[in-house]
Amino acid sequence: MLIKRTGDIPNSEVTPQSVYMNRRKFLAGVAAATGAATLGARSVSDWLEPARVLAEGTKLGPLVKSPFSADEPPTPSKDVEHYNNYYEFGTDKSDPARNATKFVTSPWSVSVEGEVNKPRNFDIEELRKLVPLEERIYRHRCVEAWSIVVPWIGYSFSVLAKLVDPKPTAKFVAFQSYYDIKQMPLGPRAGIALPYVEGLRIDEAMSPLALLTFGMYGETLPNQDGAPVRMVLPWKYGFKSIKSMVKVRFTQNMPPTTWNIADAHEYGFYSNVNPQVDHPRWSQATERRLDGSFFGKRIKTLMFNGYGDQVASMYNGMDLRKYY
Ligand SMILES: Nc1nc2c(c(=O)[nH]1)N[C@H]1C(S)=C(S)[C@@H](COP(=O)(O)O)O[C@H]1N2
Ligand SMILES: [Mo]
C-alpha cells in the first residue's frame, strides 16, 4: 500500500472556512510586505503552520478564468451532486450522495511513480497549491447517454506530470482510486473489480484539457463527486474521469482499466465520445442533458463531446471504430 493514512483528523482540527479565509488574507499581506510569495521551494504558509486539509464544501479561490470553458450555463449543482456514478458507494445514481457522506478524505496523499525521474508522494494540500486554480466549465458526457455542464476547479494534469519528469519510456499513465471496504462496504457488490483503475496514453494525459480537479461550483469537491481529487477528461466518456485518486503511475504498456476489464466488448481503452459509434446496447447519437427538470433535455451528441479542435489530432490515422 503506497498511501499512508494515519487516521481521522478530529473535526476540531480542520480549519474552519472563516479562519482559513482570514489566514489567506493575512498571508497575502505577508507576501506583499516581504515582496516574495515563496521562501525557497516552500510557500510562506508552509513556514507558518503545517498544511491542513480543507473540508468538503470549503470555498476555493481566487480562481483564474479558463479559455477552455464552454460557453454554456452550468447544470444546477443539485443535479450534479445527486445523480452520480461512484460504484464504491452503490450502483444507483442516488446512492453516492447518501452513502459517501462520512467518507474520510483527510489526510490524503497521491503517489506519483513509475517511469519518471522524480517519483514523489504529494500531500493533497501541497498538490492543490502547485499553481493557481482555474475554473473550467466543461461538458461531461456519461457513456450511459446523460450529460452535465460543470464548473470544475483545478489545473492541467500536465503541470503535475512535468514536475515528476517522465522518462522517454513512459508511454501511458495509469490512475488508481482509493478503496477501503470499511469505508465502502458496498464495494464488493459493485460488480466491477476494485480499486477502480483507469488509464490514458501519455499524449492524452498531457493535453491541456486533462484536468486535475479539486473542486466544483466554487468549492472543494463533494465526496460523491470524487473528493478530494479526481481527473476530468471532457472529450471522453465519463467513466474515464476517475474519482478520489491515490496513485498515478507512468508506464511503458497500456494499463488495464476497470470497465474494459468488466466488459471489453462494451468499453474500450480510448472511449472518446463518438456519436457515430453506438454502444452495443444503445445509441450514442444523442444525450439527455440534466437541467434541473425531471427528464432533462434530449440533445445531439458531438464528436469528441465538442472538443475536437483540441484533441482530434491525437487520433489522426486511427480507426475510431476499432479503437473505441
Ligand atoms: N472511482 C470511481 N471513479 C468514477 C466512477 C466510479 O464508479 N468510481 N464512475 C465514473 C463514471 S461512469 C462517471 S459518469 C463519472 C461521474 O462523475 P460525477 O458523479 O461527478 O458526475 O465518474 C467516473 N469516475
Ligand atoms: Mo459514466
Image (spheres, rainbow, N blue to C red):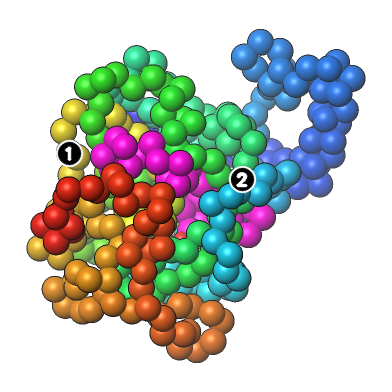
Can residue 208 be seen here? The reply is yes
| Viewer-side residue, 71 vs 29 | 71
Residue shown at 65%/17% (left/top)?
42
Q: Is residue 288 above or below residue 28?
A: below
Residue at disc 1, CB closer than 8 Å to ligand 1: no
Q: Amino acid at mark 1?
A: Met
The verdict on residue 43 being magenta is no
Q: As drawn, is 86 to the left or to the right of 6? A: left
Q: Which residues are magenta?
A: 200-227
Q: Residue placed farthest to the bottom in the image? A: 294
Task: Residue 123: give x, y in percent of width and height.
Answer: 52, 29
Can residue 263 be seen here? The reply is no
Q: As drawn, is 314 to the left or to the right of 308? A: left
Residue 165 - label:
none
Q: Amino acid at mark 2?
A: Glu
Q: Is residue 3 above or below residue 222?
A: above
Q: Which numbered disc flags the more N-terminal residue, 2 or 1? A: 2
Label 2 environment density (alpha carbons within 10 Å; few <14, some 14–19, many ≥20): many
Task: Residue 209: give x, y in percent of width and height.
Answer: 45, 47
Task: Residue 237: give x, y in percent of width and height.
Answer: 32, 61
